[in-house]
Amino acid sequence: MIEVKNVVKEYNGFKVLDNISLKINKGMVTSFIGPNGAGKSTLLSIISRLIDRDGGEVYIDGKEIRDWDSGELARKISILKQFNHINIRLTVRELVSFGRFPYSQGRLTKEDWQKVDEAIRYMKLEDIQHKYLDNLSGGQKQRAFIAMVIAQDTEYILLDEPLNNLDIKHSVDIMKTLRRLANELGKTIIIVIHDINFASCYSDYIVVLNNGRIAEEGRVDEILREEVLENIYELKFSIQNIGNNRICVYY
Amino acid sequence: MKGHYLLIALIVLSLISLFIGVKEVSIKGVINLEYDELRILLLSRIPRLLSIIVAGMGISISGLIMQSITQNKFVSPTTAGTIDSAKLGILVSLIAYSNSSTIIKMLISFVFALGGSFLFLGILKKVKHRGAVIIPLVGIMLGSVVDSITTFFAYRNDMIQNITAWLQGDFSMIIKGRYELLYVTIPFVILAFLYANRFTLAGMGEDISTNLGLNYNRIVGIGLVIVSIISASVVITVGRIPFLGLIIPNIISIYRGDNLNTNIVPTILMGSSFLLFCDILGRLIIYPYEIPISLTVGVLGSIIFLYLLFRGNR
Amino acid sequence: MMNVKSKLYILLIAFIVLVMLFLIIGLNSYNWKYALSRRIPKIMAIILIGSSISFSSTLFQTITNNRILTPSVLGLDSLYMFIQTFIVFVFGSMKMAYLGKNFNFLVSVILMVLFSVIIFLMLFKKKNNIFFLLLFGMVFGTLFQSLTSFMQVLIDPNEFLVIQNRSFVSFNNINMDLLWIAIIGVFLTAIYIFRHIGSLDVMSLGRDNAISLGVNYDVQVKRVLIVVAVLVSISTALVGPITFLGLLVINISREFIKTYKHKYLIPGSMLIGSIILVGGQLIAERIMKFETPIGVVINFLGGIYFIYLILREGKAI
């Protein structure tokens, strides 16, 4: 379990995160939603130790992140941020193989390569696995990075706006894959996501951040209510039940 | 970093600059149209002021453009390799045309600088698809090849100290007849303003700019030409002035973000005010002698910029 | 196209051939003892420095993620020239000769390393910020350069010749004592960083991904910077401002070897660096007969070769 206790983050006197306390449940897909600048990406970065908080603690499986050895933590939790610009020339396969670094420090065993192949299959990248990243579209690159995170095979997977740059088909594919990872492999997924309908259809739990605080949190059916969302986004919402899902219309 | 403060600073500093110097020039004298004082004003003070402002604006805007089109914060106008070609031109004019007037020597250097720029652009044309990162690399490499040629001949002819002296930033030699090459810069500064929008887009990458209908290669080419011509004319006329092309755009970007459109004016204002400030100080500290501007800029600039960087690091 | 390992073998062979040429050409039964006694230390210095500079430049580019940067942006060679010019300016070249090379070497290395440590500490107090470090280094570099230029213009032309000699890299008068100190220094630094070399590839993915994959990115950056500062200081104090070699070597290495894997890139660049220096010295000595500084030869031929490589690549698309 991931537990966030009273986390505070300030930039230039401005509180980006103001006393955040949260428990992330295992085996579920949790979405962080909220307006721009709400602090979602910052929170994700703090949980995954990419940046340091100014106050509070974060516990992963009972141990505070400062007490974790970074290499061990890399086998527990992985994060993919929004912007991934790399300067070196890599093929898809080479990139995905980096995901095995926490286990084999660059010297991959047969088992590692199996995991790499699995990840490539999960993300349907077999056809382009030997192509260079700079020859791929934005969406293909994104899928390759997600495959790398999958190859890292961690219990907790954090993704910051993974659907940016993806077309509808691939967005749906990714969300379905994340769903599978949670359902079949019991992974705990946290995603920061803009599209509230994707959050609605594919997550179990939603945390709404606004102005550095948690405005609401709860199961999908609790949060996906017109009053709740109108309050947060300051827009008129109309929520329809389509199939099994709650779909928001706010255009 | 606000535009208005910088503008006020520039105007005030300009006025101060006109009235400092060894020969007496006073406000009363100018108003009464005293012949001697007006003569000094016209022959020396005003040209000097103009060249400082033009040089300050030109180099800082060149740095801004360079950083934008190469998408790299660590380049300066020297990365276009033009300065090295100008240096070769200076060597040639010192050796082969040593009896010609200064302005002729300057023109010869300028021709060399232009030649270097064309060579640079020609090479870039052939390596189009490598992304923005290749631009400064080619510039640096080409510059160092040209520089090695210059050093080779300078070493043999014992001219290294001479060239170093020429390239020392110095405004004290600016009098009518020795600085007019600088005027070449002005139309290009204006051009830079007109193209600012397009440079910003080019700075976002080839894909985005092409997507928005821009001829990426042409814009990069135009930008490099502007940078080359401005930096060549300043270096040949005034010498090398540090910081303007690299650090000032970076400071502006740290405090104001990366929007070239809104940054152009503060950049050129900061460039010229800073240069003017250093020049005035250089003329006052050991009055009636002068500290060359490259030294004042180097020392003063370091202190100011280290402080600004330190503050901006929070 | 050849694979990476074959390219490394080619480089190794070229290296050995050049070293042999350097040692053997012009030897005859009369002079061989004397010639070798001069050539062997020289080639040791060349290989040592070529490898150090290449090694540190490669590492530096990995942590800065910027292909046009080399350790020169840290301002170290400007500082070196400032120290040399200052000594001559204030004390005169006679005093400098009197103080001796060893003293000069030690003072230079100590000041350069001290300077690096100070700016690292200043900037890395709260968090690592490479961007600011580089800008800081560039500002300091410019400061030293301005002061140096100013002194150089004022200096008596005869004195200036002494400084001018310092500003050109030269392997012609290496002191054996200094060489041993340098070898030890380089060896210690290599050991310090060796254990952590594996994470360099991952660091090429950028800070966020590297941390996510378990690399202690910030600590590693500090480690690399210290190693770079020490290696560059030792090399510069030994032969003069040589960081320009780094840009040439790393870019030729990338174009030629075409790999991101440091386990090939590092040895490859060290070989290329040594080849360039040995080749350059051969040309400067035997063909140009010492009349041209080796830096001029290297910049000219190296720059042209690099431009050739990228033009060739351009056509291949």
Image: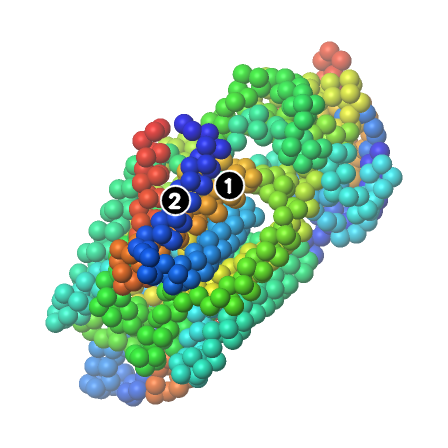
Residue at the image point whose x is 27% and y is 63% from the top? C291
User: Residue C94: which quarter of the image?
Assistant: bottom left
What percent of the width, then of the height, locates residue C123? Answer: 62, 61
What percent of the width, then of the height, locates residue B131? Answer: 41, 38
Q: Which residue is mark 1?
A: C265
Chain at tag 1? C
Q: Which residue is mark 2?
A: C17
Of callouts 1 and 2, the N-terminal one: 2
Q: Amino acid at mark 2?
A: Val
Residue at the image point whose x is 27% and y is 83% from the top? B30
**Image quarter in which the C terminus of chain A is found:** top right
Residue at the image point whose x is 63% and y is 52% from the top? C191
What percent of the width, then of the height, locates residue B178? Answer: 21, 71
Of C220 and A177, nearer the camera is C220
Left or right of residue B129, residue A20 in this image: right
Secondary structure of the residue carrying tag 1 is helix
Left or right of residue B18, residue A132 in this image: right
Q: Amino acid at mark 1?
A: Leu
